[in-house]
Image: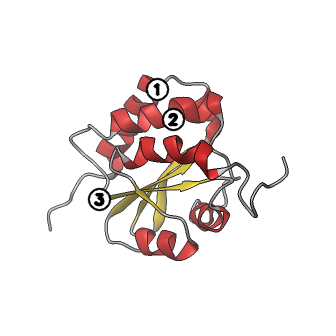
Amino acid sequence: MAALGGSKMYPEIMVIPMREELTRAGLKETRTAAEVDAAVSEKGTTMVVVNSICGCAAGKMRPGVRLAMQNATMPDHAVTVFAGQDREATERARSYFGGHPPTSPAIAILRDGQLVYLMQRSAIETSTAPAIAQELQRAFDTYCVKTTA
């Protein structure tokens, strides 16, 4: 599809509700590479959600993330980028995904900037929102537990 309005694939008005679905759940939107770098460089665990306009996969991913955000164990930080809209931020986020092929949507957990978990589109599109939430909660419980030192 040809880009509309510069480097954006879709008119911004179309994606606002999809952006807000995640920001209302507590994720911070990152729209530049510098914002992604700042988020990933934070100490502890950071969930990075690659949002997408795709109805089949992202339409299940966003509710799954919202449900997972009610878990007792949570990442220290949670951010989102929007594929096809915020290209620079999306490319930078994907650069932290350890050479995995880029997919949209995708959900990653990084610990101190290092990838420890990645759910790609292939797993998302074959799941339901509750199943995505359950898998993310398992990942939170595995990778986001606070250590006492």
- Asked whether the beta carbons under mark 2 and mark 1 sit within 8 Å of each other, the answer is yes
Left/right placement of residue 131 relative to residue 45 reads: right
Establish if 119 lies above or below 28. Answer: above
Q: Say which of 16 and 93 sits in front.
A: 16
Residue plotted at (24% across, 45% down): 73
Q: Earlier in the sequence, mark 2 or mark 3?
A: 2
Q: Which mark is on residue 89?
A: none
Residue plotted at (39% across, 59% down): 46
- Asked whether the beta carbons under mark 3 and mark 1 sit within 8 Å of each other, the answer is no
Q: Label 3: few (<14), some or many (≥20) within 10 Å?
A: some
Residue 91 place in picture, x, y as percent = 65, 64
Q: Label 1: few (<14), some or many (≥20) within 10 Å?
A: many
Which quarter of the figure is the C terminus placed in?
bottom left
Circle 2 is placed at which residue position? Answer: 61
Residue at the left extreme?
Answer: 148
Residue 125 place in picture, x, y as percent = 62, 29
Residue 105 in view here: no
Q: Which mark is on residue 76?
A: 3
Q: Say which of 84 and 47 sits in front.
A: 84
Residue 42 in view here: yes
Name the amino acid type tagged 3. Asp
Nearest to viewer (mark 2 / mark 3) = 2
Name the amino acid type tagged 2. Met
Left/right placement of residue 117 relative to residue 89 reads: left
Q: Could you say whether the residue bearing mark 3 is in a helix, strand or loop?
A: loop
Residue 103 place in picture, x, y as percent = 67, 47
